[in-house]
Image: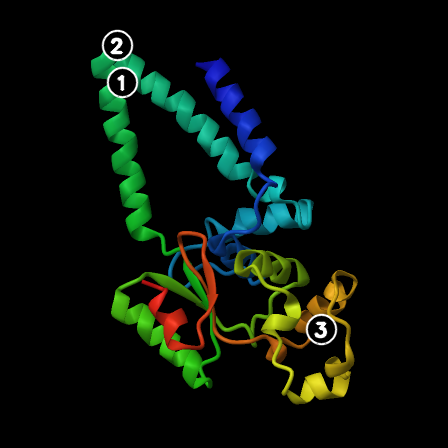
């Protein structure tokens, strides 16, 4: 039992940095920067450890996912103990599996994972929210002008979008003209400059951005993008 738990911990830690942030992780980080006794969709249980891990090791995915990894390892240990108490063998194992699956089902039903970076003044952004509502998808709203993403969050968002920062930049905004963005380079060496500009001037971020529970991300500004949501 302990060997299996240890092996799982090693695999989870080793793979923690092989992919970027999930949408719910970005949400918990943002909520953690504005700690409260409660949020519109949940209590402070998850944002608090996200804030603590990001404060202890800023930008570290291993640290951010540390509590989840620990819980996964504990789940293996507890599952083994439950199976033993149920008599062991096939019947004990099957009883344990049913219990774990039921708990996972209840968790998934109550935890929205899709997130939209929303500007309520934008008609296209409102259309994306309406589309999510029509599909019955549980989602969280991030008003990114009031709660601007950090440079690290923007990098994670770009990874999920498979896009470059200049591809999600609203170059017609006044801030873009003041910065002279139209004359900036668009190479790998210029990437950080663009990301920093988006972080400092969130109005430059194209809208709306939708990060789905299955790991996809889209700039939901046209019919094809809206239909891809579900």
Quadrant location of residue 124? Answer: bottom left
* CA distance separating discs 3 and 2: 59 Å
Q: CA distance from mark 3 to mark 1?
A: 54 Å
**Residue at point 47%, 17% (across, down):** 4
Mark 1 vs 2: CB contact within 8 A: yes
**Please, what secondary structure does the residue beneath circle 1 have?**
helix
Q: Quadrant of the N terminus?
A: top left
Image quarter for residue 203? bottom right
Task: Indicate left or right for 65 with 107 as reference.
Answer: right
Image depth: mark 3 or mark 2 in front: 3
* SS label for mark 2: helix
- Which residue is labeled 1 in the image? 93
Residue 26, percent from left and from top: 53, 57
Q: Which mark is residue 223?
A: none
Q: Position of residue 34 (x, y in %)?
A: 56, 63
Q: Which mark is residue 89?
A: 2
């Amino acid at each position: 039992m302990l060997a299996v738990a240890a092996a799982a911990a090693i695999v989870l830690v080793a793979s923690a940095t092989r992919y970027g942030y999930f949408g719910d992780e970005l949400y918990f980080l943002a909520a953690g920067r504005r700690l409260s006794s409660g949020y519109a969709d949940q209590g402070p249980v998850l944002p608090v450890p996200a804030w603590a891990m990001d404060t202890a090791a800023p930008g570290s995915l291993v640290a951010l996912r540390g509590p989840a990894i620990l819980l996964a390892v504990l789940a293996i240990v507890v599952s083994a103990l439950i199976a033993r108490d149920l008599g062991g063998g096939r019947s004990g194992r099957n009883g344990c599996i049913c219990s774990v699956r039921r708990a996972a089902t209840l968790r998934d039903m109550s935890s929205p994972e899709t997130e939209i970076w929303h500007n309520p003044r934008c008609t296209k952004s409102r259309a994306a929210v309406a589309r999510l509502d029509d599909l019955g998808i549980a989602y969280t709203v991030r008003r990114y002008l009031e709660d601007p993403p950090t440079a690290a969050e923007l990098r994670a968002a770009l990874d999920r979008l498979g896009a470059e920062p200049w591809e999600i930049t609203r170059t017609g905004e006044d801030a873009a003209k003041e910065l002279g963005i139209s004359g900036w380079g668009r190479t790998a060496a210029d990437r950080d400059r663009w990301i920093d500009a988006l972080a400092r001037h969130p109005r430059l971020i194209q809208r709306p951005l939708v990060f789905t529970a299955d790991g996809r991300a889209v700039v939901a500004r046209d019919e094809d993008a809206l239909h891809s949501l579900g």
